[in-house]
């Protein structure tokens, strides 16, 4: 039930951009989308439904791969190259008008595309897809696609928690199915799909801040077990966007920028990365775990081709 080898190879060399919500995944996705030959898929609902199935013993791996690869190559990539899968709403973060030149867009829209020609063109493009909240599934995905590149966006907790509090997505009484991307837990729409079953009761009883730190730890504990990934510190991306983009381009093997790359970089330079005025500390029982995540993430954000742990480049304070 697998597809042609060329299709599987194209999907296998895709780039996944992930991280917690409000960590800069959208910004990184936009930057990569500006590169020559890159097609970008923004938070695909079907893949959020497929990814958790990797944990199910009853899931046949070949069938799962057939669905995953058909969607990414046939449904997304070929249609994007043909101009049939482009978002023209400029107000959306995934708008193609932000990242591709008018000439390239018009070239796709004003051409007829025969399937053999379109298939050959698609093989020369690179798939980048953004899926926040899926870090717990990365080891399983790596077993299926060991050559896939993974970019993990990380943001220090006080700023990320402040941003999520402003959104109100984790307030008790808010249905998760209305705010979270992806499926939800077996107890209904109040349980996000990334929550382990043994934490269901704790999550339902918890207040907003405790829920947010449960989320933060679920996303970022275990980063050191992902040596094939590249971790990007959001603050460093904002402070030095060109070097950080160059680092990721070397990692994924795409280097050719476009005028649109510079336009998006200019928006990064204008971001105010100042920390929030109020600090939101984790519950005492989670404090040491959060500290460990910070130290690990800062070390990983500095690594090159191989991970060599060292002390963080800036002092981490408890609050």
Image: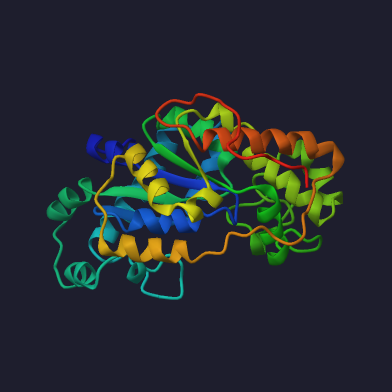
Q: State whether residue 72 is above or below residue 27.
A: above
Q: Quadrant of residue 312?
A: top right
Between 244 and 224, the one nearer to me in the picture = 244
Coordinates of residue 150 in the picture (x, y in percent): 44, 39
For this view, does 246 lie left or right of residue 157?
Answer: left
Coordinates of residue 155 in the picture (x, y in percent): 60, 49
Residue 191 visible, this orientation: yes
Residue at (46% x, 27% y) in the render: 143
Residue at (36% x, 37% y) in the render: 251
Between 287 and 277, the one nearer to me in the picture = 277
Between 56 and 249, the one nearer to me in the picture = 249
Residue at (74% x, 51% y) in the render: 212
Between 114 and 110, the one nearer to me in the picture = 110
Marks counted in the figure total 0
Coordinates of residue 236 in the picture (x, y in percent): 51, 49
Snapshot colouring: rainbow
Q: Quadrant of residue 285?
A: top right
Residue at (29% x, 60% y) in the render: 80
For this view, does 1 lie left or right of residue 81?
Answer: right
Q: State whether residue 34 is above or below residue 313.
A: below
Residue 56 visible, this orientation: no
Quarter the N terminus occupies: top left
For this view, does 240 lie left or right of residue 6?
Answer: right
Coordinates of residue 124 in the picture (x, y in percent): 20, 47
């Amino acid at each position: 039930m697998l597809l042609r080898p060329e299709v599987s190879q194209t999907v296998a060399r895709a780039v996944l951009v992930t991280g917690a919500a409000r960590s800069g995944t959208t910004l990184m996705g936009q930057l990569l989308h500006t590169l020559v030959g890159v097609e970008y898929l923004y938070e695909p609902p079907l893949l959020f439904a497929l990814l958790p199935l990797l944990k199910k013993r009853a899931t046949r791996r070949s069938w799962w791969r057939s669905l995953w690869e058909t969607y990414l190559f046939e449904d997304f990539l070929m249609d994007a190259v043909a101009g049939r899968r482009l978002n023209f709403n400029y107000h959306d973060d995934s708008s193609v008008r932000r990242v591709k030149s008018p000439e390239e867009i018009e070239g796709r829209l004003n051409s007829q595309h025969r399937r053999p020609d379109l298939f050959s063109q698609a093989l020369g493009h690179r798939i980048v897809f953004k899926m926040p909240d899926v870090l717990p599934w990365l080891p399983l995905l790596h077993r299926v696609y060991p050559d896939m590149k993974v970019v993990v966006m990380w943001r220090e907790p006080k700023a990320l928690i402040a941003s999520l509090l402003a959104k109100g997505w984790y307030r008790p009484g808010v249905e998760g199915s209305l705010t979270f991307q992806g499926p939800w837990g077996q107890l209904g729409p109040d349980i996000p799909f990334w929550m382990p079953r043994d934490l269901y009761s704790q999550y339902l009883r918890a207040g907003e801040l405790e829920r947010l730190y449960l989320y933060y730890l679920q996303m970022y504990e275990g980063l050191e077990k992902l040596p094939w990934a590249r971790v990007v510190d959001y603050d460093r991306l904002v402070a030095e966007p060109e070097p950080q983009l160059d680092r990721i381009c070397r990692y994924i093997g795409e280097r050719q920028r476009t005028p649109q790359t510079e336009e998006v970089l200019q928006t990064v330079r204008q971001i105010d990365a100042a920390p929030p005025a109020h600090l939101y500390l984790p519950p005492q029982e989670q404090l040491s775990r959060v500290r460990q995540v910070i130290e690990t993430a800062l070390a990983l954000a500095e690594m090159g081709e191989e991970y060599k742990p060292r002390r963080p480049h800036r002092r981490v304070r408890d609050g």
